[in-house]
Amino acid sequence: MAQYDYDLFVIGAGSGGVRAARLSAMSGAKVAIAEEHRVGGTCVIRGCVPKKFMVYASEFSHHLKTAKGYGWTIENATFDWEAFLAEKDKEIARLSGIYVRNLQNAGVELAHGKARLIDAHTVEIDKIGTRTAEKILIATGGRPWMPTDLPGFELAISSNEAFHLPALPKRIVIAGGGYIAVEFAGIFNGLGVHTTLVHRGPNLLRGFDDDVRSHLAEELEKRGITVMLGTQHTGIEKTPGGLKSTFNDGHDVESDVVMFAVGREPYVEGLGLAAAGVNLTKTGAVAVDAFSRTNIENIWAVGDVTDRINLTPVAIREGQAFAQTVFYDTPTSFDHEMVASAVFSQPPIGSVGLAEADARKQYGKVDIYLSRLKPMKYAFGGSDERSLLKLVVDSATEKVVGCHVVGPDAPEMIQMAAIAMKMGVTKTQWDSTCAVHPTLAEELVTMREKHEPMGLGQVA
Ligand code: NDP
């Protein structure tokens, strides 16, 4: 008789957990996966996927304005929030169903309920009971962090609720300057909601290239978003007209909805990690080595719960590397270098490699190639939106170490740039690539003049 009920028990059926469970089961292992909500995790249920649908929905207002410049007459265009939500929810249910079927087809047992560790080999699942497993994988992801010491914070929503608002608000205040804040600011603004984005820092998107950050803030304002930088909530209170946000600079803004997008935290609460002896990092994430193994020999963790790079494709690759290492006898550690990412702001951002400031710290001397231009599409229609394309090159080796684009289709472009950069492309090789004309992307391979930032060089 087997010593354990399962070879592998996975906690959390999001992107990383599902990939790891399926691949492991396909090796012949007996695998179960527990999920307390719907199968698919943050990305499919309340993250990337529904967010992208909301971005698509909201972009039409901008397209309609541009269309007028191209000769179209579109009268009485209106948006139906409820109809959109119904379509979105139908698609999310379909995708979640595919995840369930894929697990079943791979022979993975699905346990619906919150699971917690009793010890290093025993898991207790709500309403199901205890099960034992030789190996355990924690893939519970993250969840929105809320400023619980802020007076009135309970009146605000997080991104979780933004996907299901009963009605589209007329006015929204969004706090935060990260991915989620700028993406939802674009969504609500595009849907006609008066949008105020409030961020404590001097600029949005900390960690991104400084030119990208300031360019985006300008473009968001051009699209009609009020961007308040260096500003932080001091409280939220109910008023007859809605909700009043008060700020540290003495200002206040009334809105119908206040949304906090001020970071996410690893979801470890109630997981019983202490009972199993699993160590956490200083930031409360599950501590793992390069092979995603915790300090407990038979317990691994992948995805946002480990707080390495909190992106869906990274969680998937970490889950895949886990399965290869543990069930296919092929030790594999996912390389977290040169991971491209996109911010689906409006205009969107694609970025891979180092920001200029980080590259200067790492390499000393770097060459910068930068172009700001009006996308051809906006030749008609009156939009004064500008795109930004920037390359950061290590002067000594000529390697392209950073590529940053703000503009239409930037997320699509950056995937291709990431391939070349992962292979160690030099600027000469990059430039030997013939342009695709007429595109915005061609600018990337035609930038020859080094850019000297104001204050550092000759160009005023
Ligand atoms: P981020 O960590 O990206 O940003 C958090 C923001 O909240 C920062 O601007 C931060 O400011 C601010 N903040 C933190 N604490 C406070 C506070 N107490 N008061 C006011 N502001 C505060 O978090 P997100 O929630 O936006 O996203 C979480 C992660 O999810 C991202 O890092 C990303 O990895 C992933 N994600 C990826 C997406 C994509 O790939 N397109 C989309 C959405 C999420 P400061 O900079 O000053 O610290």
Image (cartoon, rainbow, N blue to C red):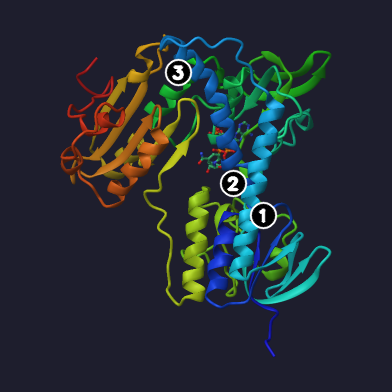
**Disc 1 and disc 2 in contact, CB within 8 angstroms:** no
Taking the view exactly as shown, the residue that stands out farthest to the bottom is: 1
The quadrant of the picture occupied by the C terminus is: top left
Q: Which residue is mark 2?
A: 43
Q: Are marks 3 and 1 in contact (CB under 8 Å)?
A: no
Percent coordinates x, y for residue 249 in the rendering: 63, 16
Q: Is residue 105 above or below residue 180?
A: below
Ligand 1 is in which quadrant of the figure? top right
Given residues 198 and 340, the one toward you in this image is 340
| Mark 3 close to ligand 1, CB under 8 Å | no
Q: What separation in Å lies between label 3 and label 1 (alpha carbons)?
A: 39 Å
Q: Secondary structure at mark 3?
A: helix
* 278 or 334: nearer the viewer: 334
Q: Residues within 10 Å of mark 1 (few under 14, many from 20)?
A: many
**Tag of residue 218:** 3
3 vs 1, front mark: 1
Q: Residue at x 74, y 20 (%)?
A: 256
> Quick one: SS at disc 2?
helix
- Identified by mark 1, the residue type is Val
Q: Which mark is residue 39?
A: 1
What type is the residue that disc 3 sits on? Glu
**Can you say whether 301 is above or below 211 in the image?**
below
